Image (cartoon, rainbow, N blue to C red):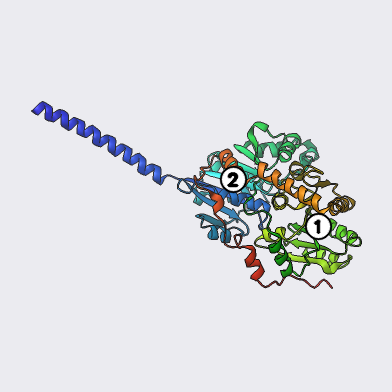
Amino acid sequence: MGVKAGRLKFQMSRLMAKWFTSSSRSVGAKLKKTRVLFLRRTTAFGGSEMVILNLLKAIDYERTIVSIASPVDVFSKLLKDLKLPVRCLPLTAPFAGNFCRAFFAWISYFVPLRPDKIILAEGAFRNFPLSTALAAFVSARGNVWMMQLHTAPERAPEHSERHFGFIPSLGLYERARFSLTRGVLCVSQGVKDRLMLGYRYDPEKMSVVYAGVDTKRFSPIPHDIRRALRKNLEIPDEGTVIVSAARLDSNKRLDRLIHAFGALSFEHPNLWLLLTGDGPLRDELRALARSVNHRENIRFLGYVDDVCVILRLSDIYVLPSDEEGFGLALAEAMACELVCVATKTVGPSEIVEDGINGFLTDRTYDGVQNGVGRALRLSSNERKEMGRRARQRVVHNFRVEEAAAKGLAFLKIDRTAGNFCDLRPNTSSSSSSDFLAAPQATLPDLS
C-alpha cells in the first residue's frame, strides 16, 4: 500500500506540475501582446492615411497593442467611430537639427512607449531622418519596418551632395537608413523600382502591396438616386460632372484641371467641376477658378467625410498630379465606374490601361486638357463600357481585403479572423440618403 500510495502521489505531483506549467504559459500568452507603434508625419487625412487605417481595421487586437503617433491627430475620431482600441499620440520629437540631439530626443520619446515594433509610415520620401530610424532601431531592438506610401524623387539627391564640400556621399545616408529596417512595404512597383535604381535599396527587403479599395462601398448607384444627389448640389441631371478628390497642394496640380475645364466648357457648356479636399493652395485655386470660363459651374466642396457620395453623382474623374505613389482616390473612382483620366505617374500607370479602362495623359496643361477631351468625346455607351472595365480592374486587382492581408503578413502583424470590411465609421457609412437630407453649405461665391 505504501509503495502504491507513493507512486500515486508522484503521478499526481507530475500532473499538477504539468497543469501549473501549461496554465502559466496560457496566462502568459494571454498577457503578452506585441506592442506596435506606427509613426506618421501628417497634417491631414488623405489616401496614405486610409492605407494605414485599412491595416488598423484588420489587426488582431487580442494579440496586439497598437499606437499611432502623428504631429496632428487625424485618426482618433475615425478610430473611435470604428471602435478600434488604438491609442493616438502626439508626435513631438524633432525631425531636423543636430543629429545627436535629435537621436536622444527620439530615444526619450520611445522609451516610455516600450514598442516591440515600430512602423515608419512615410507619406513623403525621407519623412523620417536617419536619427529617427536609428533611435527606432535601438528602441525596438531592431524590429523596424518602413512603409513607402509615396514615390521617391527620380534621382537620389546624394548623387550631387558632398560631405565637407568635396567628398561624394555616394548615397551613404539613404543606405544607412535602409539598413536599419527589416523591410520596406511599397504601394506600387514603380515606388519599389525607384528605390532600387535611384537609392540602391535591396529588392529582397522590399515588397509591393498595392493599396486596396472597399469595392462594396465604392460602387455605382441607380440613376434615380444619382439624379437626387445632383439636385442637392444644384447640378442638372443632363450635366456632365468632372470630379477630383485631392489635397489642394502643389503636387496635385489641380490648376491643370481648372484650366482644362475652362477651355473645354466652351464646347461643353453643361460641364461641371467638383473639387473635394482642402490645403495650402485653396485661395490660389479659387482665384484661378474665378478667371476661367463657366466659373459658376465650379464647386469647391472642401473636406468631405464620405467622398463616395460625390463620386457616385459624377461622370469623369481626373487626377492631374505631378507624382503619385499609387492613387487610391483614382482606384475608388474606377470602382464607382467613372471614366478616369490620370497623368502618367508611377501609381496611375499601374492602375489604368490607357484607352481600355481609362486614359493616361502627359503631365502638362495640354496633356490634361487632351485627356479630359478624350473622355468627353466618348458616347454614352462607350462611357458605360469603359466604366464597367474600370470597376473590373479594381475588383480583380485592388480589393482592400487582400491588400490588408498582404500588408500585415509582410509587416508580421497578427491579423483578425473576422471580416474587417464590416467595420465602417459612422461618417463614412452614411448613406446617400443622409447626403440628400443634409443642408449643403458648399456652393461658394466665385465672383
Counting other residues with Cα less than 10 Å from the Cα at mark 1, is it few (<14), some (14-19), or many (20 or more)?
Answer: many
**Residue 280 visible in the current orientation:** no
Q: In the rendered image, which quarter contains the C terminus? A: bottom right
Rendering coords of residue 107 (x, y %): 56, 48
**Residue 118 visible in the current orientation:** yes
Rendering coords of residue 309 (x, y %): 68, 61
- Seen at 65% across and 49% down, the residue is 213
Residue 10 sits in quarter: top left
Q: Are marks 2 and 1 in contact (CB under 8 Å)?
A: no
Callout 1 amino acid: Leu
Q: Which residue is mark 2?
A: 401
Q: CA distance from mark 2 to mark 1?
A: 31 Å
111 up-or-down from 16: above or below:
below
For mark 2, give the secondary structure.
Answer: helix
Residue 246 sits in quarter: bottom right
- Seen at 67% across and 49% down, the residue is 98
Is 72 left or right of 86, judged from the image as shown?
right
Residue 254: which disc?
Answer: 1
Is 344 left or right of 414, judged from the image as shown?
right
442 up-or-down from 61: above or below:
below
Q: Nearer the viewer, residue 344 or 332?
A: 332
Counting other residues with Cα less than 10 Å from the Cα at mark 2, is it few (<14), some (14-19), or many (20 or more)?
Answer: some
Q: Nearer the viewer, residue 285 or 81?
A: 81
Callout 2 amino acid: Glu
